[in-house]
Image (cartoon, grey):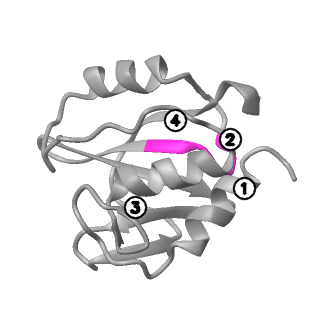
Amino acid sequence: MMPGERAVAAARAALGVRFRLHGRSAEGLDCVGLAALALRAEGFEGRVPSGYTLRSGDAVRVRVAIEVLGLVPAAEPRPGDLLLFRAGPGQLHFAIQAEAGIIHADARLRRVVERPELPWPVIGRWRPATGD
């Protein structure tokens, strides 16, 4: 398998799982839980944060935390990348890059979905260091 393919497959396997804040299992996932599920499929064993709120908005703190976990910034899109979006004022959101779109835990639709794109700006992109 090419780097990122396992992450995309794991994220796709979660399609339809209900949205649940701080969710980390088939019982429910949020965007952090989905990201952790996908990255673990690539062999990434970093610690998944907990205790956060839906609205934090501190992109610098999030970037630092992601890189401390061992993910590296990526310039060119590749399936399996972890994406960080600015979803609104004070609201950040993670998704997994797919071949022709993204997979994310959609709070409005109340489930994990695959979409061609999101209307929000991408403010970060990472992948496990071993995936380069």
Residue 110 in the image: state x and y as whole percent. 27, 78
Residue highlighted by disc 2: 43
Residue in view at x 87 percent, y 53 percent: 1
Q: Mark 4 or mark 2, which is nearer to you?
A: 2
* Foreground tag (1 vs 4): 1
Residue to which mark 4 is pinned: 125
Instruction: Give the labeled residue for mark 1.
Output: 6
Magenta stretch encompasses residue 82: yes
Residue type for callout 2: Gly
Quarter of the image for residue 30 reads bottom left
Which circle's residue, 1 or 4, is located before the other in the chain?
Answer: 1
- Report x, y in % for residue 28: 33, 71
- Per the image, label 2 sits on a secondary structure element best described as loop
Query: Which secondary structure is most common in the magenta stretch?
Result: loop
Determine the secondary structure under disc 3.
loop
Q: Earlier in the sequence, mark 4 or mark 2?
A: 2
> Which residue shows up at 31% across the image and 28% down it?
62
Above-or-below relation of 119 to 122: below
Label of residue 118 in the image = 3
Q: Which residue occupies the foreground of this view, 102 or 62?
A: 62
Q: Earlier in the sequence, mark 3 or mark 2?
A: 2
- N-terminal of the pair, mark 2 or mark 1, is 1
Question: On screen, 116 above or below 97?
Answer: below
**Marks 4/2: CA–CA distance:** 18 Å
Helix, strand or loop at disc 4? Answer: strand
Which contiguous range is marked in magenta?
Answer: 77-83
Mark 3 vs mark 1: give the one in front. 1
Q: Quadrant of residue 12?
A: bottom right
Q: Amino acid at mark 3?
A: Leu
- Residue 100 seen by the camera: no
